[in-house]
């Protein structure tokens, strides 16, 4: 083996003036929303341990450091080929591009260009230089939408993860803290770069670090601790078999799911404290369970009732078995629609991972299936309403923004019966300052495409099912060649509306309002998107009910829809033309439909339905 070098580098040292390549046989960029969220949460949490608004920028050099692991490089002539670590380097590149764009409007900016690309003879090349990704990276850097149709998996994931960064980047980092955070990220976050000078040596290092690194995971260590405290050998064997079976089922669902299930269970039932967002604040139960749940259980034995051998048996055979099973079912419901658990899926569509400890919090191991389902539906419905209201009012639902409030809800609803649960959840919704009527100007912008898409899918599906039409929600959110897209009723032609708008900016603001949007197949926009409204209108009649309701024909011989219009009192009307006043009318209509869908009375109906079923049974 030739010379091997290991250098601890800051992000600036790693990326400035260096070019990294990926061989064609390397695997795709595969990070998903979960990994991206965890990285943002970890970075923000570490940064806020030291940040104070009163600090000068120079104080950042004394902030704590963050270790992002190691990467393995094969050095070939002037190029560095990534053998291990492209997932992190790709994600870091996306984060730097996002931060570059985020600070564009600021008078003083932290220079990031040389960490993202280099330029020679007016030719730009990215420091993470992968040919098939360059067009996509260029579009993201220039803040231009990129169509990833027919693109490789890596490019699709890059586009999706950049959208995740836009959606989940902590709001409290976007203000005065931003330049401090950028300084900290590039100067205080470190990666160890391990360099070999042949592929063979690089892969030997990679295999040694991965295949032979048989260190126990936190899940293994927790199991070992619990089993070691069971004195009855037969019960120990039985508990071990149950543990292995359930962990196997969770791993089948996805990587790290067994650890996530345990964290979710312990947080939901036992976390009493959470770290405050201020300098020097110590981690609470909620935080420690996330990073070292095996140690937390050992340190809190008496608090969670682990005193004698029988307690440890119960902890595995009753509690772990029950909550891990419920977690598994909830995760499955978040991936595909399950009858009775639709709200779990809806919340997951927003990437809201905090829902899982909340959904488990009111459950007791001796609850019957009907009671479990009722409690889950109550909490999931509460979250569905809360998230919709926040998104409608341009408020973020990122992990860091919502973490403390959701911890308080989780703690307050722990183990509660349904009737008490309804009271608590209704009080929390009633205490929210904003409802749908608080924002009459909801519009599509760069950061809320997914939220607007989900609003349109839910609104369209709701009015159709209420009119007696089978649900097409799965079709509306499906991904693929025939996917749906947000369609602007007004084409991107401000000159057609110069009689009502004196400036292009005013036109675009109105054009993007939700009342001027529909959800239609991608092919429709390609064929008809630029046409004047009068020419689009006949084609709208051939699509979903929200689009169809613009056309006068929708109000003839359509008994299901007309009955729904009548009993709901919603002001549906056709529009022969679509001027500013017509868009205003649709904006109000969409708001009223949203108020009907996300009505807090849903919570009471869940309880009433359960009581009726119990009486009937």
Image (tube, rainbow, N blue to C red):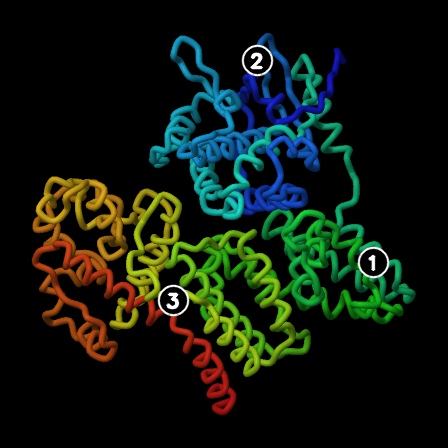
Q: Position of residue 547 (x, y in %)?
A: 20, 58
User: Is 96 on the left-hand or right-hand side of 515?
Assistant: right
Q: Position of residue 334 (x, y in %)?
A: 50, 58
Q: Position of residue 388 (x, y in %)?
A: 41, 62
Q: What residue did someone put label 2 on?
A: 79
Few, some or many C-alpha atoms within 10 Å of disc 1 (few <14, some 14-19, many ≥20)?
A: some
Q: Residue at x 54, y 20 (%)?
A: 21
Q: Residue at x 88, y 58 (%)?
A: 228
The circle on residue 298 is 1
Few, some or many C-alpha atoms within 10 Å of disc 2 (few <14, some 14-19, many ≥20)?
A: some
Disc with the residue nearer the chain's start (2 vs 1): 2
The circle on residue 435 is 3
Q: Secondary structure at mark 1?
A: helix
Identify the residue at the far bottom of this view. Answer: 615
- Contact check, label 1 and label 3, Cβ < 8 Å: no
Taking depth in this image into account, of 360 and 612 the one nearest to the observer is 360
Q: CA distance from mark 3 to mark 2?
A: 55 Å
Q: Secondary structure at mark 2?
A: strand
């Amino acid at each position: 083996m030739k010379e091997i070098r290991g250098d601890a580098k800051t992000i600036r040292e790693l990326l400035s003036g260096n070019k990294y390549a990926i061989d064609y046989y390397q695997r795709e960029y595969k990070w998903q929303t979960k990994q991206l969220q965890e990285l943002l949460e970890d970075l923000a949490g570490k940064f806020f341990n030291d940040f104070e608004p009163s600090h000068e920028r120079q104080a950042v050099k004394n902030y704590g450091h963050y270790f992002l692991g190691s990467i393995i490089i094969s050095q070939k002539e002037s190029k560095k080929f990534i053998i291990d670590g492209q997932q992190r380097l790709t994600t870091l590149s996306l984060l730097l591009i996002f931060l570059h764009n985020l600070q564009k409007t600021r008078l003083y900016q932290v220079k990031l260009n040389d960490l993202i690309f280099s330029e020679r003879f007016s030719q730009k090349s990215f420091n993470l230089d992968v040919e098939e990704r360059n067009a996509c990276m260029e579009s993201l850097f220039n803040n231009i939408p990129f169509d990833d149709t027919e693109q490789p998996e890596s490019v699709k994931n890059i586009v999706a993860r950049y959208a995740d960064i836009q959606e989940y980047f902590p709001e409290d980092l976007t203000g005065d803290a931003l330049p401090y955070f950028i300084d900290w990220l590039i100067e205080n976050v470190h990666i160890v770069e391990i360099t070999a000078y042949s592929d063979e040596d690089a892969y030997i290092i990679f295999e040694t670090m991965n295949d032979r690194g048989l260190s126990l995971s936190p899940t293994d260590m927790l199991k070992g601790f619990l089993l070691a405290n069971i004195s009855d050998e037969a019960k120990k064997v039985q508990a071990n078999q149950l543990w292995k079976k359930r962990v196997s089922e969770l791993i089948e669902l996805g990587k790290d799911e067994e650890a996530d299930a345990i964290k979710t269970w312990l947080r939901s039932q036992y976390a009493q404290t959470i770290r405050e967002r201020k300098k020097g604040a110590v981690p609470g139960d909620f935080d420690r369970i996330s990073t070292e749940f095996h140690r937390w259980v050992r340190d809190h034995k008496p608090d969670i009732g682990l005193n004698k051998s029988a307690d440890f048996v119960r902890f595995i055979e009753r509690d772990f078995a029950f909550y891990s099973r419920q977690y598994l079912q909830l995760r499955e419901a978040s991936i595909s629609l399950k009858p009775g658990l639709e709200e779990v899926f809806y919340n997951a569509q927003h990437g809201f991972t905090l829902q899982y400890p909340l959904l488990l919090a009111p459950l007791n191991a001796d609850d019957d299936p009907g009671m479990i389902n009722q409690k889950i539906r109550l909490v999931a419905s509460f979250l569905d309403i809360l998230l919709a209201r926040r998104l409608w009012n341009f408020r973020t639902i990122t992990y860091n923004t919502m973490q403390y409030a959701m911890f308080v809800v989780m703690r307050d609803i722990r183990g509660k019966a349904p009737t008490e649960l309804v009271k608590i959840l209704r009080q929390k919704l009633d205490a929210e300052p904003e409802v749908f009527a608080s924002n009459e100007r909801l519009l599509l912008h760069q950061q809320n495409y997914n939220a607007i898409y989900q609003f349109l899918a839910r609104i369209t599906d709701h009015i159709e099912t209420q009119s007696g039409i089978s649900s097409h929600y799965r079709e509306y959110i499906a991904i693929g060649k025939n996917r749906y897209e947000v369609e602007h009723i007004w084409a991107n032609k401000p000159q057609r509306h110069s009689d009502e708008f004196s400036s292009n900016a005013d036109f675009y603001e109105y054009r993007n309002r939700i009342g001027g949007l529909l959800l239609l197949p991608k092919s429709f926009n390609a064929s008809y998107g630029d046409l004047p409204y009068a020419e689009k209108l006949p084609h709208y009649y051939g699509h979903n009910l929200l689009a169809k309701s613009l056309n006068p024909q929708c109000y003839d011989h359509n008994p299901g829809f007309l009955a729904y219009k009548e009993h709901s009192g919603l002001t549906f009307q056709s529009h022969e033309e679509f001027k500013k006043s017509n868009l205003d009318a649709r904006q109000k209509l969409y708001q009223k439909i949203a108020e009907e869908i996300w009505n807090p009375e849903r919570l009471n109906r869940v309880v009433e339905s359960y009581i009726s079923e119990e009486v009937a049974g």
